[in-house]
Image (cartoon, helix red, strand yellow):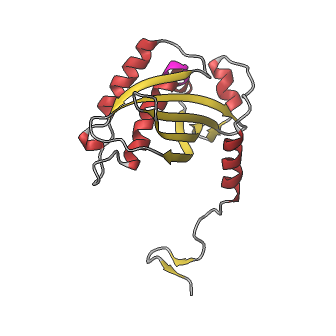
Amino acid sequence: MYPFVRLFKDGLLARRAGPLDVLGTHVSHHVCWPWDLDMWAELNNGRTLTIFDLGRIPLAIRTGLVDVMKRERWGLAIAGTAVRYRRRVRAFDRVVMRSRLIGWDRRFMYIEQAMFRPDGECTGHAVFRSAVTDAKGIVAPERVCAALGIDTASPPLPGWVEAWLAAEDQRPWPPMQDVADTRTGLAAQ
């Protein structure tokens, strides 16, 4: 089940923390609970992505994006993710998460997030391609920036993000065209 109680708590903490510059870093603190574990008693990889939500949504609250989205009746979607899992997180381990917007292009905004142990060792890192949406589809980031009252250009995206985006452009869509029947999963002979 989605951790709505944790999200509500983190949303309240974000509102109390006050406004943050659109390119600022939101810092949040999390605990790996027993229901976050996989069968190896480690933080489940899917749950890791959900816990990243608990940093990203408060970031959107603090930068004013959530208020703008409510006013404009916009939504928020994830259009892609690149994740690195580097160190185990086990039950009752505490992690510090850093979340920040690193830039945007003509369609998407890119958010970088990392989890750290209290001693500073990084356990995992992700970059998310996100889109603000309305009834017609994707809202251009320049329109989002205007609604936020900022007229700054995007900082240059890091080279590793550009390389990821270039690789994504080469990825076939729809995938698995060699599969003859999607109902049975049998490959074409």
**Residue found farthest to the bottom:** 189
At horizontal 44% and vertical 43% (from top left) the residue drawn is 49
Could you tell me if residue 9 is visible in this image?
yes
Q: Which residues are magenta?
A: 61-66
174 shown above or below 57: below
What is the quadrant of residue 123 in the picture?
A: top left
Toward the viewer: 76 or 188? 188
Toward the viewer: 33 or 58? 33
Does the segment drawn in magenta span residue 27? no
Report the quarter where the N terminus lies. Answer: top left
At horizontal 34% and vertical 26% (from top left) the residue drawn is 8
> In the image, residue 187 lies at what x, y percent?
52, 80
Report the quarter where the C terminus lies. Answer: bottom right
Which SS does the magenta portion mostly show? helix
> In the image, residue 122 lies at what x, y percent?
47, 36
Is 17 placed left or right of 5 in the picture? Answer: right
At horizontal 64% and vertical 21% (from top left) the residue drawn is 147
> In the image, residue 28 lies at what x, y percent?
42, 25
At horizontal 34% and vertical 45% (from top left) the residue drawn is 43
